[in-house]
Amino acid sequence: MKPDKESARGLAQVEGYLLWNAEIEEARRQARRFTDALPWLTTAQREDVERVYAVDRIEACRDTLTRIAGRAHELRGEYTERYDRLRARCVALSVLAVSTVGGICAALTLIVR
């Protein structure tokens, strides 16, 4: 792999790691906010509710991110296929145009002589 691609891949991994950790922290913050609204909970109950709430939110985020990543992969394939077809059409059209112009120039040269 080229150094630029390796660097880009490494940066993407670090960014993903940081974003995921921020998501985990946000889940914990929301769990705390949720249990703050339930003042009658004991400390042990509060910790259990926070843990369950955070785990549930993290699982939901993981599922969402997995679906998004899968769809992005599908779209990449679709757009690559469309781009390849469009490029092939453009090349064919360019060859046809150059051939037509060349033929017209040759015909005009023969007619003028």
Image: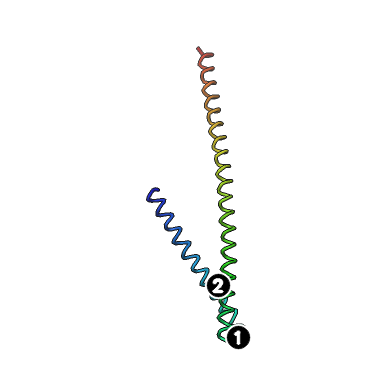
Q: Earlier in the sequence, mark 1 or mark 2?
A: 2
The residue closer to the viewer here, 62 or 83, is 62
The residue closer to the viewer here, 50 or 98, is 50
The kind of residue on which mark 1 rests is: Leu
The kind of residue on which mark 2 rests is: Ala
Residue behind mark 1? 41
Tag nearer the camera, 1 or 2: 1
Residue drawn at the location 57% of the way across and 79% of the way down:
48
Image coords of residue 19 (percent x, y): 49, 65
Whether 97 is drawn above or below 2: the answer is above
Residue drawn at the location 54% of the way across and 75% of the way down:
28
Q: Quadrant of residue 69?
A: bottom right
The residue closer to the viewer here, 113 or 51, is 51
Contact, CB < 8 Å: mark 1 with mark 2? no
Q: Quadrant of residue 70?
A: bottom right
- Packing grade of label 2 (10 A; few <14, some 14-19, many >=20) is many
The residue closer to the viewer here, 78 or 63, is 63
Residue behind mark 2? 27
Whether 104 is drawn above or below 113: the answer is below
Image coords of residue 22 (percent x, y): 50, 69
- Packing grade of label 1 (10 A; few <14, some 14-19, many >=20) is few
Residue drawn at the location 56% of the way across and 61% of the way down:
65
